[in-house]
Amino acid sequence: MNRPEWHWAIVGSASSAGLGIIMPAFALALSNVLGVFYNPDHAKMKSVIQTWCIVFGAVGGGSLVCGTLQSYSFSLMGQKLAKRIRLMLMQALLKQV
């Protein structure tokens, strides 16, 4: 019954996959940051840490975008399906009278 919203299902599924990648990406970035602290050269350490700060920002931004798209697309699908079912129910009830 959700056939008319198939494109929202694709967007929601892709966003769910993107949201599933966020935690492993965060773990990878965090492990690399912890490894940078063992570098004796402080100037090199600072430049690498700044790079990883940008990566953390990108991971957070990706999480925001993917979470919003996932919620919006699946909510929209559910709302349209509920409306369609209610209309079918009302039409069936009116036909009985």
Image (cartoon, rainbow, N blue to C red):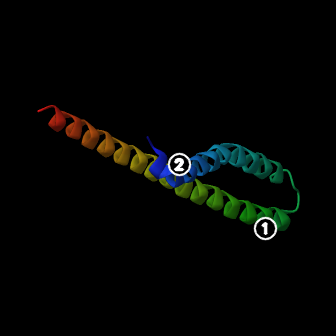
Q: Is residue 83 visible?
A: yes
User: In terms of depth relative to the viewer, which is nearer, 46 or 2?
Assistant: 2
7 on left or right of 23:
left
Q: How many marks?
A: 2
Instruction: Say which label, 2 or 1, has the lower sequence index.
Output: 2
Q: Which residue is mark 1?
A: 47
Secondary structure at numbered mark 1: helix
80 on left or right of 35:
left
Callout 2, which amino acid? Ala
Q: Is residue 67 visible?
A: no
Q: Which residue is mark 2?
A: 9
Label 2 to label 1: alpha-carbon separation: 41 Å
Residue 69 x %, y %: 50, 55
User: In terms of depth relative to the viewer, which is nearer, 42 or 8?
Assistant: 8
Dividing the picture into quadrants, the one containing residue 78 is top left
The mark lying in front, picked from 2 and 1, is 2
Dividing the picture into quadrants, the one containing residue 90 is top left
Quadrant location of the N terminus?
top left
Residue 24 x %, y %: 71, 43
Callout 1, which amino acid? Ser
Secondary structure at numbered mark 2: helix
23 on left or right of 7:
right
Residue 67 x %, y %: 52, 50
Question: Residues at badges 2 and 1 in contact (C-beta under 8 Å)?
Answer: no
Quadrant location of the C terminus?
top left
